[in-house]
Image (cartoon, helix red, strand yellow):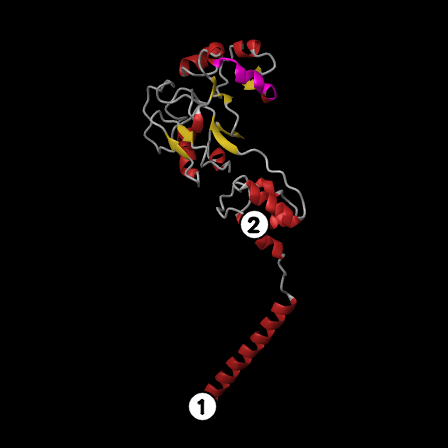
Amino acid sequence: MENTVLMAIFTMSSLSLFFSIFLGFADKFLRVEENPLIAKVNELLPGANCGGCGFAGCYDFATKVVEGKVEPSACSVNDPDNIKEIGALLGKEVQSGPKLVARIMCKGGKAEAVRKQTEYYGPKTCLAMHVLSGGDKLCFYGCLGGGDCVNACPFQAMFMNSNGLPVVIDELCTGCGICVQNCPRNIIELHPIDRKVFVFCKNQDDPRTSAQVCKVACTGCSVCARKLDGAVKIENNLAFLNYEAFEKLETVELSEICKTGALSKLKGNGNFN
């Protein structure tokens, strides 16, 4: 009995010594040295781990920046001064672009969009409504009003107004793009914060149908394209803006050109005129 106990103690001690020596050698010879720049770059990132850059988190993004696989400015959440400081650490000049914010390309809320005669009783999320029934509006292009974008925003930069449409708080929006990814109707876009003129509609139905389903739809009437030559073009019954001719859009009274108000300017914080 005593020999058995001694043998067990000797065996366990020998194994412990062997694995200690093995792990010591492994740590010395198999260690992967980490670039100290990664930690420094990571310290200059917001730390929100929002994933808006397309990577798993801020540390993963910092690694890719140091490896030269992505530009520091790809993090839209970061402060411009921090982006420049990251560039200085890497020995390169980095230009940060204008601040981007989310814009909702739909004005068809409860008061404007015509609703279906049938009642929807399923889950009240945009994704579910889009997949199961197309929502409770006759327009199959507009905002569903379920608030998926609001719930997905990691910065609380959006809220649903009383008309059933999301509103962006410009001061809080970082342009991370998570709301864009969570909109099944693809009606959320990122734009420079100083851009105020938009076509707030995505309906590509024929003019008669689009006018029947929403009071503020773009009907593709082409009046804007004729009066703002070069600034607007019509494709698939929908107006698209040429922002290179943006000056024209800033100086005209859009309400006299677009009778439905689909082409219009923003007030502050993503509200419509």
Q: Amino acid at mark 2?
A: Asp
Whole-percent x, y for residue 11 in the image: 52, 82
Q: Residue at x 46, y 23 (%)?
A: 266
Circle 1 or circle 2, nearest the eye: 2
Instruction: Answer whether residue 236 is visible to the viewer in this image.
Output: no
In this rendering, the answer to whether 5 lies above or below 139 is below
In depth, the one of 29 and 71 nearer the eye is: 71
Question: Earlier along the polypeptide chain: callout 1 or callout 2?
Answer: 1
Q: Residue at x 59, y 35 (%)?
A: 97
- Sort mark 1 into few (<14), some (14-19) or many (20+) by Cα contacts within 10 Å: few
Magenta-drawn segment: 244-254
Q: Quadrant of residue 152?
A: top left
Whole-percent x, y for residue 118 in the image: 33, 22
Secondary structure of the residue carrying tag 1 is helix
Secondary structure of the residue carrying tag 2 is helix
167 with respect to 246 (left or right) = left
Whole-percent x, y for residue 28 in the image: 63, 69
In this rendering, the answer to whether 9 lies above or below 89 is below
69 with respect to 198 (left or right) = right
115 with respect to 265 (left or right) = left
Q: Which residue is mark 2?
A: 60
In depth, the one of 32 and 17 nearer the eye is: 32
Q: Which residue is mark 1?
A: 2
Whole-percent x, y for residue 187 in the image: 48, 27
